[in-house]
Each structure stands twice: as structure tokens, then as C-alpha cells.
Image: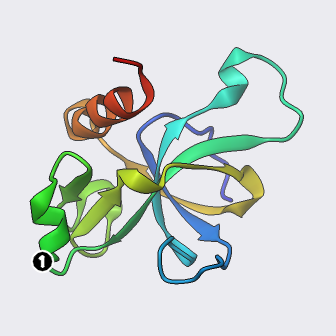
Amino acid sequence: MIEHILQIGDVVTAQFPSQNPSGREQEGFRPASVVGIPSRLGKLRFPLAFVVPMTTDRGQEWADINPNLYVRFSAGVANLKSPSIALLDQVRAIDISRIVAYRGSLTPQEYEAISKAIQQIMEPD
């Protein structure tokens, strides 16, 4: 990865490994938004980041059904090449060596929808 200190809201290119069963989780090289930096709490066993993979927005109906879980971004936001959807149902920890490039950063306003949804997903009622 080019020299950049990761921040919450950064959009990076990350390599996601093949999954079994395939077809349900994102795989390959793709954009992802950084949503957590565990090293903020101290030294880690392994260098990790929590990310949300993104996919190209092709007007998928499933994204319309739950816009809080599938947050849409226009092309150009954080240097995304095409309209994209942040897949908040696929939050995962990845080794930072899987982050191969920095694309850009979401503004606080752009990141707000992701932040609110992550809080609802992770916090108890």
C-alpha cells in the first residue's frame, strides 16, 4: 500500500480471499471503506483493519429494499470509479497487507450513514 496512515472513512482497494460457499461474500480486489482501526486500543497480535467491501451499483433491487444496510455512493466520491454500494452486511477484519492502495476518503457527511448503521448493527438494544 502506498504510504498512508489509515483513518476511519478511508476508501482503499483491498484483496478479499475466495469464500466457501462462493457467491455470498465479496471476493477479489475491490474498494472497501475502513470502519475500524483496532490498534487504537493498543498493540495487536496482527495488524488488522475493519472494512466494509463495496460493489458496483447497477441499480440492484436488493439495495433499494434496505438503503440503511446498503449505502450508495456516486462515482467520484473518494475517487470511486463507478457508482458503488457499501455492503454493511459484510463487515470484516482483514490483515492490512490485503490493503493494496489508498483511493480517497469519505467526508464526515458521506461517512455518517455508514457510521450510524454500524452502530445499530453492533450495539445491543
Q: Which residue is label 1 attached to?
A: 59
Residue 26, image x, y percentages: 50, 72
Q: Residue at x 11, y 60 (%)?
A: 65
Which corner quadrant holds the C terminus? top left
Q: What is the count of numbered marks?
A: 1
Instruction: Name the element at disc 1.
Output: loop
80 lies left or right of 104 = left
Between 83 and 52, the one nearer to me in the picture: 52
Residue 64, image x, y percentages: 10, 63
Considering only vertical position in the picture, is 110 above or below 40? below
Between 46 and 109, the one nearer to me in the picture: 46
- Specify how the rendered protein is coloured: rainbow
Q: Residue at x 66, y 78 (%)?
A: 20
Considering only vertical position in the picture, is 99 above or below 44? below
Amino acid type, callout 1:
Gly
| Quadrant in the rendering for residue 103 | bottom left
Residue 96, image x, y percentages: 72, 51
Q: Residue at x 15, y 52 (%)?
A: 67
| Quadrant in the rendering for residue 48 | top right
| Quadrant in the rendering for residue 73 | bottom left
Between 123 and 82, the one nearer to me in the picture: 123
Q: Residue at x 22, y 38 (%)?
A: 113
56 lies left or right of 19 = left
Instruction: Give neighbour class at mark 1: few <14, some 14-19, many 20+ (Cα, 10 Å).
Output: few
Which corner quadrant holds the N terminus? bottom right
